[in-house]
Amino acid sequence: MGYRKVLAFYLEQKGVSPAELAHRIGSPRSTISALLTGRAKEPTLGKAKAIADALGVPLEEMARKTYEEE
Protein backbone atom coordinates (compact mmCIF):
# COMPACT_ATOMS: atom_id res chain seq x y z
CA MET A 1 0.00 0.00 0.00
CA GLY A 2 2.86 2.38 0.71
CA TYR A 3 3.53 4.38 3.84
CA ARG A 4 1.92 7.61 2.66
CA LYS A 5 -1.41 5.86 2.01
CA VAL A 6 -1.24 4.03 5.32
CA LEU A 7 -0.50 7.27 7.18
CA ALA A 8 -3.35 9.09 5.41
CA PHE A 9 -5.71 6.19 6.21
CA TYR A 10 -4.94 6.26 9.92
CA LEU A 11 -5.05 10.05 10.15
CA GLU A 12 -8.56 9.96 8.68
CA GLN A 13 -9.64 6.95 10.73
CA LYS A 14 -8.45 8.51 13.99
CA GLY A 15 -9.63 12.04 13.11
CA VAL A 16 -6.17 13.53 13.57
CA SER A 17 -4.89 16.35 11.37
CA PRO A 18 -1.33 16.35 10.07
CA ALA A 19 -0.64 19.41 12.20
CA GLU A 20 -1.93 17.66 15.33
CA LEU A 21 0.15 14.57 14.60
CA ALA A 22 3.26 16.72 14.15
CA HIS A 23 2.56 18.39 17.49
CA ARG A 24 2.03 15.04 19.24
CA ILE A 25 5.37 13.66 18.04
CA GLY A 26 7.31 16.91 18.41
CA SER A 27 8.18 17.25 14.73
CA PRO A 28 7.68 20.04 12.24
CA ARG A 29 4.49 19.90 10.21
CA SER A 30 6.71 19.72 7.12
CA THR A 31 7.86 16.25 8.21
CA ILE A 32 4.31 14.90 8.11
CA SER A 33 3.62 16.77 4.88
CA ALA A 34 6.68 15.21 3.25
CA LEU A 35 5.49 11.74 4.26
CA LEU A 36 1.97 12.36 2.99
CA THR A 37 3.06 13.78 -0.36
CA GLY A 38 5.75 11.20 -1.00
CA ARG A 39 8.66 13.65 -0.79
CA ALA A 40 9.88 11.39 2.02
CA LYS A 41 9.39 7.69 1.30
CA GLU A 42 9.30 6.34 4.85
CA PRO A 43 10.15 7.62 8.31
CA THR A 44 13.01 6.31 10.40
CA LEU A 45 12.09 3.45 12.72
CA GLY A 46 12.03 5.78 15.71
CA LYS A 47 9.79 8.27 13.93
CA ALA A 48 7.51 5.47 12.67
CA LYS A 49 7.14 4.21 16.25
CA ALA A 50 6.34 7.72 17.51
CA ILE A 51 3.72 8.16 14.77
CA ALA A 52 2.12 4.79 15.49
CA ASP A 53 2.04 5.52 19.23
CA ALA A 54 0.56 8.98 18.67
CA LEU A 55 -2.18 7.46 16.52
CA GLY A 56 -2.81 4.58 18.92
CA VAL A 57 -1.98 1.98 16.28
CA PRO A 58 0.49 -0.88 16.71
CA LEU A 59 3.66 -0.26 14.70
CA GLU A 60 3.47 -3.81 13.37
CA GLU A 61 0.01 -3.14 11.94
CA MET A 62 1.18 -0.01 10.12
CA ALA A 63 4.23 -1.86 8.79
CA ARG A 64 2.15 -4.79 7.55
CA LYS A 65 -0.26 -2.47 5.73
CA THR A 66 2.65 -0.52 4.23
CA TYR A 67 4.04 -3.59 2.53
CA GLU A 68 0.73 -5.25 1.54
CA GLU A 69 -0.13 -5.54 -2.10
CA GLU A 70 -2.98 -3.28 -3.11
Image: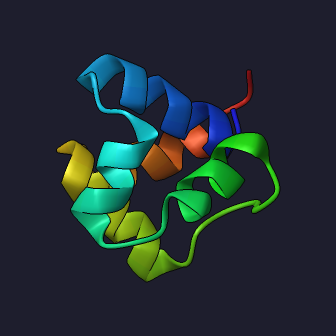
Where is residue 28 shown, x and y percent of the image?
48, 68
Residue at position x 50%, y 44% in the image: 64
* 47 to 24, vertically: above or below: below
Q: In which quarter of the image is the C terminus?
A: top right
Quarter residue 49 falls in: bottom left
Q: What residue is at 21 percent from the left and 58 percent from the top? A: 53
In the image, what residue occupies the spot 30% across and 32% down?
Answer: 16
Residue found at x 39% / y 31%: 11
Residue 35's spot in the image, x, y percent? 65, 53
Q: Is residue 13 visible?
A: yes
Residue closest to the eye, 13 or 19: 19
* Front-lying residue, 21 or 53: 21
Quadrant of the rendering where the N terminus is positioned? top right
The reply to whether residue 67 is in sight is no
Percent across and percent down for residue 3 are: 63, 46
Query: In screen coordinates, is 63 left or right of 39?
Result: left
